[in-house]
Amino acid sequence: MERLEFESLLEELKGVKVYNIDNDDNGGVLDKLFNELKAEIVTSDLDIDKHRWYELSTTVIQVGDYFIGARGVSQMYSESSTYSDISVYLKFFEMVREEVQTYEYHEAK
């Protein structure tokens, strides 16, 4: 995927009004993203922000060499609530993968 194609896709995603990634947008940009472009979810539940009735988190989607963040409702705490009750649409944005060096504790013998 070329950079201009990615930027065009990202602009389309920013214009769509959906509550979650699983939302069926009738052959729209989400369908194109996952079926035509074969995008994959790399990770989910990043940067959890808990509210009284729901929580928000970020899902990272890889499309070619690029990454798209999708931030929206990931958990609802009220059984009677629906996505439209909470009224938070997904927000899409570009993400960059960064390598992080970590250290793991091992007990010396």
Image (cartoon, rainbow, N blue to C red):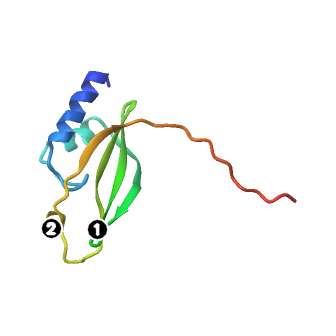
Tell me if label 2 and label 1 are in contact, CB under 8 Å.
no
Query: For the view shown, which residue lies furthest in the left direction?
Result: 26
* Residue indicated by mark 1: 54
CA gap between label 2 and label 1 equals: 11 Å
> At x 20% / y 58%, what residue is drawn?
88
Q: Position of residue 82 (x, y in %)?
A: 18, 68
Q: Give the residue type that dot 1 points to.
A: Tyr
Q: Mark number for residue 72?
A: none
Q: Position of residue 94 (x, y in %)?
A: 33, 36
Mark nearer the N terminus (2 vs 1): 1
- Position of 7 with respect to 48 (left or right) is left
> At x 26% / y 22%, what residue is drawn?
4
User: At numbered mark 2, what does the secondary structure look like: helix, strand or loop?
Assistant: helix
Q: Give the residue type that dot 2 points to.
A: Asp
Query: Does residue 7 sit above or below 80 in this rendering?
Result: above
Corner quadrant of residue 75: bottom left
Q: Position of residue 65 (x, y in %)?
A: 40, 30
| Quadrant position of the C terminus in the picture | bottom right
* Residue indicated by mark 2: 85
User: At numbered mark 1, what does the secondary structure look like: helix, strand or loop?
Assistant: strand
> At x 14% / y 63%, what residue is drawn?
84
For label 2, count other residues whose C-alpha is less than 10 Å away and answer few (under 14), some (14-19) or many (20+). few
Query: For the view shown, which residue lies furthest in the right direction?
Result: 109
> At x 18% / y 65%, what residue is drawn?
86
